Image (tube, rainbow, N blue to C red):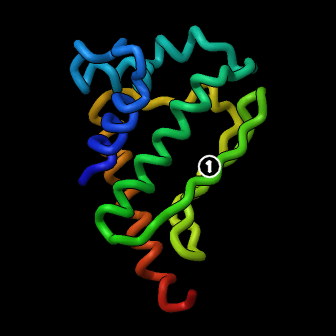
Amino acid sequence: MTVIKTLIGQVRALDQFGTWASKSDEYILKEKYVKTKEDLRNIPVIADIDEMQIKDIRLVFQAIALAFEKKTGIMCSVVMEMSHEGFGRAVVIADKIVITNKFFKDAHRYSFRTYNDLITSGDKMLEDAISIYNKYTIVA
């Protein structure tokens, strides 16, 4: 299972009022996670991050964790700490091993340039997570 499938599954599961029900998966993910250079120019460099944005970022890392679990059968935990200014860190842990680690200094600007970038980045993060786990599982 890919990260994109787990991500859209989580977004749809959290859509308690059916806001996204008639929208395509691609439309929803573009709306939430894709920002062009022009879009980014309109976002201030220094700004506070809203709670919905923090939840959307967390969903990306939860999707990585869930896709990892489905591929390997190993349970993961997502730990995320974010200040109101967008400084923070997201970590995915499998057993005792940190398989994904991302620092944020401007989380309010976190995005992907295109839908294909989102797919490619998600798949790469999952591949890297599996690689890291396999590399360090012997040590742990």
Look at 27% across and 50% down and name the residue there.
2
Q: Give the quadrant of the C terminus.
A: bottom right
Q: Where on the picture, by quarter, is residue 71?
A: bottom left
Q: Position of residue 40 (x, y in %)?
A: 54, 17
- Nearer to the camera, 113 or 1: 1
Question: Which residue is situated farthest in the bottom direction here?
Answer: 138
Q: In the image, what residue type sits under mark 1?
A: Ala
Q: Position of residue 122 (x, y in %)?
A: 36, 47
Q: Give the quadrant of the N terminus.
A: bottom left
Look at 54% across and 75% down and name the residue there.
95
Whether residue 139 is situated above or below residue 69 in the rendered picture: below
Look at 34% across and 71% down and name the residue there.
73
- The 10 Å Cα crowd at callout 1, few under 14, some 14 to 19, many 20 or more, is some
Whether residue 119 is situated above or below residue 124 in the rendered picture: above
* Left or right placement of residue 124 versus residue 41 in this view: left
* Left or right placement of residue 99 versus residue 2 in this view: right
Whether residue 134 is situated above or below residue 119 in the rendered picture: below
Look at 77% across and 34% down and name the residue there.
83
- Nearer to the camera, 135 or 59: 59
Question: Which residue is situated farthest in the front direction here?
Answer: 16
On the image, numbered disc 1 is attached to which residue? 90
Whether residue 117 is situated above or below residue 49 in the rendered picture: below
Q: Where on the picture, by quarter, is residue 115?
A: top left
Q: Position of residue 20 (x, y in %)?
A: 32, 16
SS at mark 1? Answer: strand
* Left or right placement of residue 23 versus residue 3 in this view: left
User: Does the rendering let one see residue 117?
Assistant: no
